[in-house]
Image (cartoon, rainbow, N blue to C red):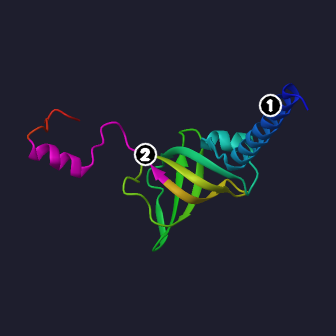
Amino acid sequence: MSLRIQRLILILITLVILSVALLLILFNTKQNIVFFYTPTELIENKITSGVKVRIGGYVKKSSIKKKSINSYEFKITDNNNDLLIFYEGILPDLFREGQGTVIEGLMNDQNTFNASKVYAKHDENYMPVSIKKELEKNNQWKKEYK
């Protein structure tokens, strides 16, 4: 075989290996994607039960009910529609009524949702207590912060 044909074969083998690697990466990424919906989008799209999704919205006022030690029931709203959430586990510290939250889990048949993870969101004015104490200790804390 001439040097020219050897190079051509090497280039073709490299392209095939790279193509297979790219296809494997894309296939695995497609299986691990979790889509983000609001309660209205979830109800309008009629997501089938057993599909893993993320829901974002606000915790509805006076909707949090503690069923047992680590079992909760609450509603998520986007001010148009509400969705009933069931969660077993420890809720985040910032989780409260009127606060933004993202819920990950599986959709049930009748506009209810079994959550596996609950993420609490905070606003831009949030400052952890440990950082605030450190700033006060160094006399860099300003009282006009919100």
Location of residue 8 by image quarter: top right
The residue carrying mark 2 is: 121
Q: Is residue 131 magenta?
A: yes
Q: Determine the residue positioned at 62% across, 56% down.
A: 105
What amino acid type should be assigned to the residue bearing mark 1?
Answer: Ile
Mark 1, Cα crowd under 10 Å, few <14 / some 14-19 / many 20+, is few
Location of residue 16 by image quarter: top right
Q: Nearer the viewer, residue 44 or 32?
A: 32
Quarter of the image where the N terminus is located: top right
What amino acid type should be assigned to the residue bearing mark 2?
Answer: Lys
Could you tell me residue 67's position as x and y percent?
A: 50, 71
Q: Determine the residue positioned at 48% across, 49% down.
A: 60
Could you tell me residue 78's position as x and y percent?
A: 54, 40
In this image, 111 relative to 123: left or right?
right
Find the magenta span and give its range. Answer: 119-138
Secondary structure beneath dot 2 equals loop
Mark 1 touches mark 2? (CB < 8 Å): no
Dot label at residue 11: 1
Q: Which of 23 and 34 is in front in this view?
A: 23
Dot label at residue 31: none
Q: Determine the residue positioned at 89% across, 28% down.
A: 2
Could you tell me residue 82's position as x and y percent?
A: 58, 47
Q: Is residue 110 magenta?
A: no
